[in-house]
Amino acid sequence: MEPILKAAGPVPADLVKDTDTAGFAADVIEASMEAPVIVDFWAPWCGPCKTLGPMLEKAVRAARGKVRMVKLNIDENQQLATQMRIQSIPAVYAFFQGRPVDGFTGAVPESQLKSFVDKLVGLAGGPDAALAEALEHAKQALEAEDFHGAAAIYNQVLQHDPENAAAYAGLARSLIGVGEASQARQVLDSIDPAVAGKPEIVAVRRTLELAEQTAGAAGQIPALMEKLAADQNDHQARFDLAMALYGDGKREAAVDELIEIVRRDREWNEQAARKQLVTFFEAFGPTDPLTAQGRRRLSAILFS
């Protein structure tokens, strides 16, 4: 298919560089007129600096030119460090349009560094509109069950943004749609841990698990309904019916049956019905109307 996104060019070689007192004005103040510049104040004897620096470089390079970084050794530039009021290291300051706009001191986790860089990217120009448009095209293709087309677009997005959770989730759903559950699992297992916990990734992982659990179960629906007709308190039959209904694409009916079990006996089988409902809601995602409706109904029973 015709690429929706233009091929990403190489990452500029000078995104991360060393500077000193003489070069500070050009490398930081002047350069920040074009893009945000992060200054990493460090010293060779600083243990936390040796950990923070590489993580910060990784986040800057992932921004692909939207943010730059310079490193300044305070031992070799003591007068400048004093002027900048650097009292402890690691110390990180961000400049944009010739002035400081953000900063922090001390070691921070990688997720916080990424958020720090993302904030600067937004300050400089907001999210990439072409990327957002591509994701919308992919979502529309997925909803239309054009799984191959959706997968192609999601792959393009990931070439430009290798940590895009929505693209990973969409690609996995596309693979599930064409019957490639094992490939979908490989995609999910390859995701960076910092991204793997995001709601859209959790949702598709639960969807995959449920698809595997309910494969072929739809054929059992008539027999299970007969069992329930004979005994409305056969909770195992009702639970199995809920799973079979889910496997047949009848999500709302599946939720109804599980909620009915909770209403009749919330403690049955160590609260199996409530736990399965939570798994359903995770698979649907937090923004799905059925999730909100189901949680309200469940809460009304549990707290009545």
Image: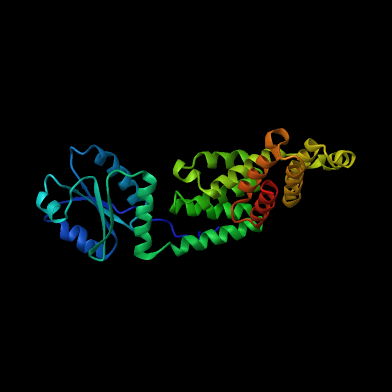
- In the depicted view, which residue is nearer to us: 10 or 103? 103
Looking at the image, which residue is at 35% across and 54% down? 117
Locate residue 202, reporting x and y percent.
Answer: 56, 45
Locate residue 247, reporting x and y percent.
Answer: 73, 44
Q: Is residue 232 visible?
A: yes
Count of marks placed on residues? 0
Q: Is residue 261 left or right of residue 45?
A: right
Q: Quadrant of residue 262?
A: top right
Q: Quadrant of residue 176?
A: top right
Q: How is the image coloured?
A: rainbow
Please, which residue is most extreme toward the front here? 304
Locate residue 62, reporting x and y percent.
Answer: 37, 50
Locate residue 155, reporting x and y percent.
Answer: 51, 51
Looking at the image, which residue is at 63% across and 50% down? 284
In the rendered image, the vertical position of residue 298 relative to residue 185, given as above or below: below
- In the depicted view, which residue is nearer to us: 49 or 216? 49
